[in-house]
Image: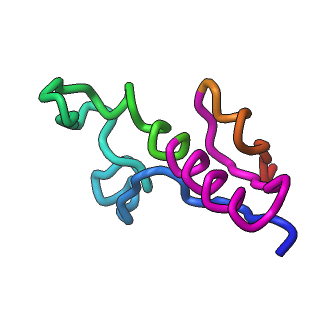
């Protein structure tokens, strides 16, 4: 394997805007409760899922290759430490 492409790297729902939803995204005002009990809005942590997915994928691939090659569409500060960013436009 030469590398991996992480896609749909964020929590999503499959509703359309026409059905009163937010496209494929969870409502930005939705509230998540962290392990320590702190509550945060989805808009604050939406791309953290992608950050941790990239970090975990990198750690797993390090066990089978010297320099893991990972691409993702998502972004979050620091994600560049473990993967590259690509845009499908």
Towards the viewer: 7 or 25? 7
Q: Residue at x 79, y 43 (%)?
A: 84
Q: In which quarter of the image is residue 79?
A: top right
Q: Which residue is drawn at 74% across and 67% down?
A: 64
Q: Quadrant of residue 74?
A: top right
Q: Is residue 50 above or below residue 64?
A: above
Towards the viewer: 83 or 47? 83
Quadrant (top left/top right/bottom left/bottom right) for the N terminus: bottom right
Percent position (x, y) of residue 80? Answer: 73, 34
Percent position (x, y) of residue 23? Answer: 43, 53
Q: Which residue is drawn at 74% across and 44% down?
A: 83
Horizontal arrangement in the rendering, residue 44 relative to residue 38 (left or right):
right
Q: How did the renderer colour the structure? A: rainbow
Furthest-bottom residue in this view? 1
Does any portion of residue 5 appear in the rendered image? yes
Tell me which segment is drawn in magenta: 52-76
Percent position (x, y) of residue 27? Answer: 30, 41
Horizontal arrangement in the rendering, residue 68 relative to residue 20 (left or right):
right
Q: Residue at x 53, y 51 (%)?
A: 53
Towards the viewer: 68 or 50? 68
Magenta span includes 69: yes
Q: How many marks?
A: 0
Does any portion of residue 31 appear in the rendered image? no
Magenta span includes 53: yes
Percent position (x, y) of residue 50? Answer: 53, 46
Q: Is residue 31 above or below residue 2?
A: above
């Amino acid at each position: 394997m030469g590398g991996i492409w992480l896609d749909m790297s964020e929590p999503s729902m499959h509703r359309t805007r026409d059905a009163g939803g937010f496209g494929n995204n969870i409502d930005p005002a939705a509230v998540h409760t962290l392990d320590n009990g702190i509550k945060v809005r989805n808009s604050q942590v939406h791309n953290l899922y992608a950050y941790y997915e990239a970090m975990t994928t990198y750690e797993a691939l390090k066990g089978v290759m010297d320099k893991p090659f990972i691409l993702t569409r998502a972004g979050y500060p620091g994600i560049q430490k473990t993967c590259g960013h690509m845009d499908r436009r």
